[in-house]
Amino acid sequence: MKGLYAEAVITGLGTIGPCGHGRGALAAALAAGKPVAAEVDRGAGLHREGGAQLAALVGERDVSRWVPPAAARRISFPSKFAVSAARMALADAGLGDAGAGPDRVGVYVATAFGSVLSTEKLLRRILLEGPQAAQPFDFSECVANAPAAQLAIAVGARGPNVTLTQRESGPLLAVARGAQAVREGLVDRALVGAVEEVTPLLHALLDRFGALARAEGPLGEMPRPFDRRRNGFLAGEGATLLVLEREDDARARGARILARVGWSGAAFDATASVADWGDGHAPLAAALRAGLDSLPGGASGVSAVVSGASGARRGDRIEGRVLRAAWGKVPLPPVLVPKAVVGEYGGGILAPALLALEGAPFGPTAGFEEPDPEVGVAPHDGGARGILERVLLTGLASGGAAAWVVLERAS
Amino acid sequence: MASFWEGLRSGRTAIGPFDRFDHSGHRTHVAAQVDLAAEPGRPRGKPPRLSLADRFAVAAAREAVVRAGLDLGACGGRPGVYFGSRTGGMLESEAYFEAFLAAAAGRGRQPAPGVLASQQYNGPGDAVARDLGIGGPVQTVSAACASGAMAIGDAVRAVRRGEADVAIAGGSDSLCRLTYAGFNALRSVDERPCRPFREARAGLSLGEGAATVLLEPLDRALARGARPLVVAAGEAATCDAYHMTSPHPEGIGAAEAIRGALADARLDPAEIDFVNAHGTGTPLNDVAECKALYAVFGDRAGELPVTSTKSLVGHLLGSAGALEAVATILCLLSGEVHPMPDGGAPDPAIRLRLVLGRPLRLSRARHALSTSLAFGGANAALVFTRHGDEGLVR
C-alpha cells in the first residue's frame, strides 16, 4: 500500500539556510556533522548574562539572483527567503514561475514566528514613539502569511495560500497539506515548506525561556540531540520549499522525481504545557504506530528516521520515547538528526531528508556522546548506510502537537 | 449562541468606545470589545498560562461541544482541532515587550518569560486541544483575516477524508495595539463604527472574540441521535497573487474561491439564498467583493440578500471567518438574514441588495455563502446548507 498521499511526488527542492544557498552547501555541512553556528549580535543588551550566544544564521543574505533589488526593498527577510527558495525549487523541478496554470498552484508554508523583525520594529515604534509612528510596511510584513503571500505574488500562484503556524510540527503539516491538495486534485502543483527568521530579540527571548543550548561548566555551547547532557537547541533560520505534483504528471513531463510523499499523520499530546513538551508519549506512539502499520513491511519497512530532535531537554525525551514505543520490539532504523547541524526552525529537516534519500552521507550526530537512558535512542554515528527506500520525518512541537511524514524513494 | 443571535437580529452595533488598552494616542477610538464579566468559566484544573485569545477560544469550544451533546472522551473517535488566529497572544506580548524594553534600558525588572508563553499563533488552538483532552490532529492556520474560514475549510476536508472523525474548528483573536496601530497606519480604520458597502464608508472597525463549530460526518451524527445544525457543504481557498494589502480590484481571486466552494458543494450559483460577505467597510474591499459576486452570480448578485456581520461586531481578524460562519449558520436556521445597522446611503457603485435595519425573512433559506478576503490576497469561501436540504449526502 502506498498510503493515502502516494500519488504526490516531490520534483523540486530549494533551500537557503545557514549552510548557504542550495543543496550542495547543505550536503557538505551534513557530511561534516558540525553545527553551522555563528555569533548572534548581543549589542542591544537584550540577552541575559551567561546565556546562549550562537545561532544558525543565514550568512549569505544577498538573494538578488532570485529577488530583484527593486522587489527586495519592499519585502522582509523571511519573504525574501521564501521567494528565493521557491524559485530555486521551481528551477530544480524544471519549471518557471508558477510552473503551471497559476490558478492551479497552491502554497503551503509553515512558520513558527513569522517576520520577527517587522513585528519588533512595529512594536518598538508603537511603544516608544507612539502608535501614529507605526509604518504600513512593517504592519503588512509582520503578518505570519507574508512570506507565503509574497511568494505567491512573485511566482503568480493563485491557488490556496495557506500558512501553518504549529511550531516545530508546522513544516511537516505543510508537506502533508500540500500533498493532500495534490492528491485530491485541488491543485496541480504545490509549493510546500517552511521559513523562519532569527533576530537578536527572538534569540534573547528563546534563551530567557531556557530553550537554547548554552555553555555549561566544561561543556561548550552546542545542541546535543539525544545526549544525556543536552540543554537546549540551536536556533536556526532560512527557508526550504519543495515542488509537489501528481506522479503521473511528473512522469509525463519527464521530471526527475526526488521522492514520493507517503503516509502522513498528526496527533496531540494534551499533557504538554503551553511552551514545553509533555509526557504523553503513549498516545503519540499509538498514532505513529498505526501509520507505520499501514506501510509495506510495517515499522521494518522504514529505512531511516529523520528526526526532529534538536537538543531540547523534554522534546528529545518524548521523541525518543515515542520512537521506541512505536517500533516496539522491532529494532529502530538509523536515526538522523539534521537539526544538530542546521538548528531548529526554518524547515531544517525537509531538505536533509531528501538528501538522505538520495544517498548523501551524514556525519556523526553533533554533540552526541553520552546516551540518555530516559531517551534510549542512539542517533546516527556517521557510519555507512544502505540505500534508503523510505524515511520517516518527525516533528513534535512544544505545546503538544505532533506530525509525521513518510517520504519514499520513487523507483 | 442565543445572545449572539439576539444581538445580530437587533441590528445594533457593538462597536463603540473600548478600554482593552490605552488608545488615546491612536488616530481612531472605537472597537468592539468582549465584556469579560460575561466570559464563561476559566479552563479546568490548574490555571495554565492563557492569553485572552486562548480564553476566548476555550470558552467558544466548550460551548460548541456542549451544544453538540458530545462526550469527546467517550465518543471513541479521533477528535482534532483546526484553528485560526492572526495574533494569538499579542495583547500579552505587548505588555511583556514594553516591560522587557524598559528593563533593557535600566528601568524596572525583567518580566517573567512565562507571560509570553501563550503568544504563539498556535496558542488558541492548542489551548482548546489541551482543555478538551484532544489526541488527534491539531493544526493552526494564520492567513490573516481568512484564518478562521480556512480552519473550518480544513476541518471539513479532514472529516471527509477520515483524518478526524470529530473536528473542533474556529478562530480566536483579541484586540491589541499592534493591529490597531497597524490598520490605522494603513488608514484603513473608520473613526466611526464601520459602514460596509455604504457610500460614506471609511474603513473597518476592529473587534475581538472567538467562534467555533463542531463538525462530524453526517451519518455518524445521525446515528448518535444528534440534530445537525447545517451541512458544511463546500469550501475553497485561493490567492489573488496581486498585492500584499489590497484586494485584486476585479475580485478575481475572491470569485474563484466562491466558484470553488460552490463546485465543492455541487451547487449552482442560483441555489445560493443569501451571502454573508467579508464586508469590511474599506473602500477597496467592498468594491472588489461586489465585483466578485457579480462575476459569479451575474445579474442575480443584485437580488441576493447580502449582509456583513462586521458591521455589528467589528473585524475579528483571524476569528472573523469563523464568527461569520456561525452567523451564517444562525441565519440559515432562523430563515432570516441578520441586518447591518441602518443609516448611511449605500454606495451607488455597489449594486447589492443590502440587508439594513431589520432582519430579512427569506422565502427560501437552504444554502448560504460566507466569504473571507485577507491580507496577502488569501481568499476563502464556505457554503452551508440547511440540514434536510443537502440533497447529496457525501
Image (cartoon, coloured by chain):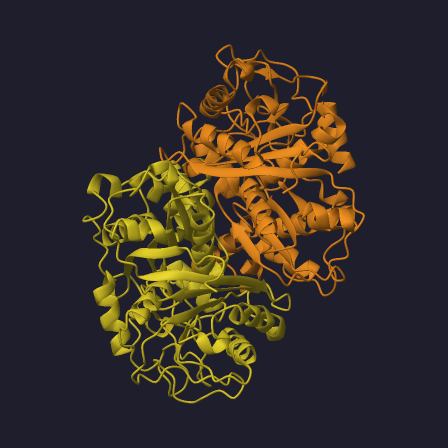
Where's the C terminus of chain B, which quadrant?
A: top right
The image shows a total of numbered marks equal to 0
Where's the N terminus of chain B, which quadrant?
A: top right
Q: Residue at x 69, y 60 (%)?
A: B77
Residue furthest toward the right? B225
Q: Position of residue A151 (x, y in %)?
A: 33, 44
Answer above or below: position of A5 versus B377. below
Q: Position of residue A91 (x, y in %)?
A: 23, 50
Chain B, colour shown: orange
Q: Residue at x 70, y 29 (%)?
A: B332
Q: Examine the rendering and report whether any part of residue B213 can be seen.
A: yes
Residue A342 relative to residue A61: left or right = right
Question: Which residue is more in the foreground, A37 or B287?
Answer: B287
Chain A, colour shown: yellow
Question: Which residue is more in the foreground, A250 or B109?
Answer: A250
Answer above or below: position of B184 versus A54. above
Q: Position of residue B217 (x, y in %)?
A: 67, 48
Q: Examine the rendering and report whether any part of residue A194 can be seen.
A: no
